[in-house]
Every structure is written in C-alpha cells, then in structure tokens.
C-alpha cells in the first residue's frame, strides 16, 4: 500500500491536471452553445445597434465619395431597412 504524496505535485502531475481540466471545460462549452442561441444573440445585437450601424455605413459611403440630393434621413432609413432585411 502506498501512501499519498505530501507536498507539491510534480510538474508532470500539474500538466495532466491542467490538460484534463481544459478538456472538460472545452467539452462543456462547445456542447452548450446552440445555433438558436447564436441567432438570438445576433438578433438582439442588431436590434440595439441598427441605427448606429446605418450611420457608420453612410459615413463610410461619404468617405468613399457618395453623395445624394435628398435628405440623409432617407438614406439612413433605407440602410436600416436593408440591415433588418438581411
């Protein structure tokens, strides 16, 4: 019968322990995220940020040299609609 070791674990024991812990965390994480969770998260992100995203797209368009003869609000509304559609 062998007695348990007293003191610090060897470096090999530490590597085995950390590897098995990382593997169990990886298995739990990958199996707990479903496609519907990701879609819902993306939907909530776009719901909260659709106006600022449209403004960023229009700002980039102006930097590229785009111009319009109407009000910018019409362009922003169109961009928001297209972002929601896609």
Image (tube, grey):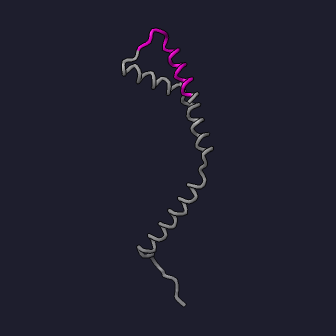
Which region of the structure is painted magenta? 67-83
Q: Please give the name of the residue rendered at 59% of the width and 40% of the height, measured from the top-left corner.
A: 39
Above or below 29: residue 36: above
Q: Quadrant of residue 44?
A: top right
Quadrant holding the C terminus: top right
User: Residue 85 colored magenta?
Assistant: no
Rendering quarter of residue 81: top right
Q: How many marks?
A: 0
Considering only vertical position in the picture, is 75 above or below 16? Answer: above
Q: State the quadrant of the N terminus.
A: bottom right
Q: Is residue 60 left or right of residue 50?
A: left
Q: Is residue 46 above or below residue 16?
A: above
Residue occupying the point 54% across, 30% down: 49
| Magenta span contains residue 70 | yes
Q: Residue at x 50, y 17 (%)?
A: 75
Q: Residue furthest bottom?
A: 1
- Of residues 21 and 84, the one nearer the viewer is 84
User: What is the residue that sits farthest to the front in this orientation?
Assistant: 86
Q: Main secondary structure of the magenta part?
A: helix
Q: Position of residue 54 (x, y in %)?
A: 50, 24
Taking depth in this image into account, of 28 and 67 the one nearest to the observer is: 67
Q: Position of residue 64 (x, y in %)?
A: 36, 21
In the depicted structure, whether residue 16 falls above or below residue 78: below
Q: Quadrant of residue 66?
A: top left
Left or right, residue 60 beside residue 47:
left
């Amino acid at each position: 019968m062998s007695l348990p070791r007293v003191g610090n674990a060897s470096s090999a024991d530490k590597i085995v322990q950390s590897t098995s812990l990382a593997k169990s965390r990886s298995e739990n994480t990958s199996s707990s995220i479903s496609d519907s969770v990701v879609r819902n998260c993306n939907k909530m992100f776009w719901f909260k940020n659709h106006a600022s995203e449209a403004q960023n797209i229009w700002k980039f368009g102006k930097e590229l040299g785009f111009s319009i003869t109407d009000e910018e609000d019409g362009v922003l509304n169109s961009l928001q609609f297209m972002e929601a559609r896609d």
